[in-house]
Amino acid sequence: MFCLYAFSGESSCFVHVLLNGLDMAERGHRAAIVFEGAAVTLVPELEKPDHPLNALYRKARQQGLVDGACRACSAKLGVLDAVRAAGLPLLDDMSGHPSMAEYISQGYTIITF
């Protein structure tokens, strides 16, 4: 099991999160994607049908790979409403941020981007 923590707010980095998550799932691994840090700002962009990564993003969401987005970073970076509108869970079990320790306790290996 792998948890892919995306911190970078650059699409050119996030494409690798999507590709790896989908590849892992296709090969029978459990993969979870977490939007953290500046990556939360990608959510409203990825939701746009004309965004170049929209198809991959939708595929990952349809396969249940996207666990959610950091509540604290979404609020701080002004995308909390957009993340809510996208229907992503807001993760906040570590002082408003998603806890890596919680994923590790569930058996996940953390990979950061």
Image (tube, grey):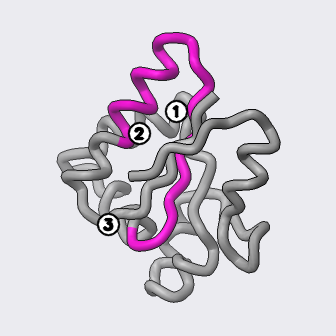
Residue 79, x across and y down, in percent? 46, 78
Q: Residue at x 45, y 51 (%)?
A: 112
Which disc is residue 62 wearing?
A: 1
Looking at the image, is 22 positioned above or below residue 54?
Answer: above
Give whichever of 33, 107 is nearer the camera: 107
- Mark 2 crowd level (few <14, some 14–19, many ≥20, 10 Å Cα): some
**As rendered, which of 21 and 2 lies closer to the eye?**
2
Between the residue at mark 1 and the residue at mark 2, the CA separation in whole angstroms equals 6 Å
Label 3 Cα crowd, 10 Å radius (few <14 / some 14-19 / many 20+): some
Residue 60 pos. (x, y %): 46, 35
Verify CB contact (< 8 Å) between mark 1 and mark 2.
Answer: yes
Residue at image point 71% right, 77% down: 96
Q: Residue 9 carries which label?
A: 3
Quarter of the image where one finds residue 59:
top left
Q: How many labels does the image show?
A: 3
Q: What element carries label 1?
A: helix
The residue carrying mark 2 is: 58
The quadrant where residue 45 appears: bottom left
Residue positioned 39% across, 72% down in the render: 38
Left or right for 60, reference 69:
left
Tell me which label, 3 or 1, sits earlier in the chain. Answer: 3
Identity of the amino acid at label 2? Arg
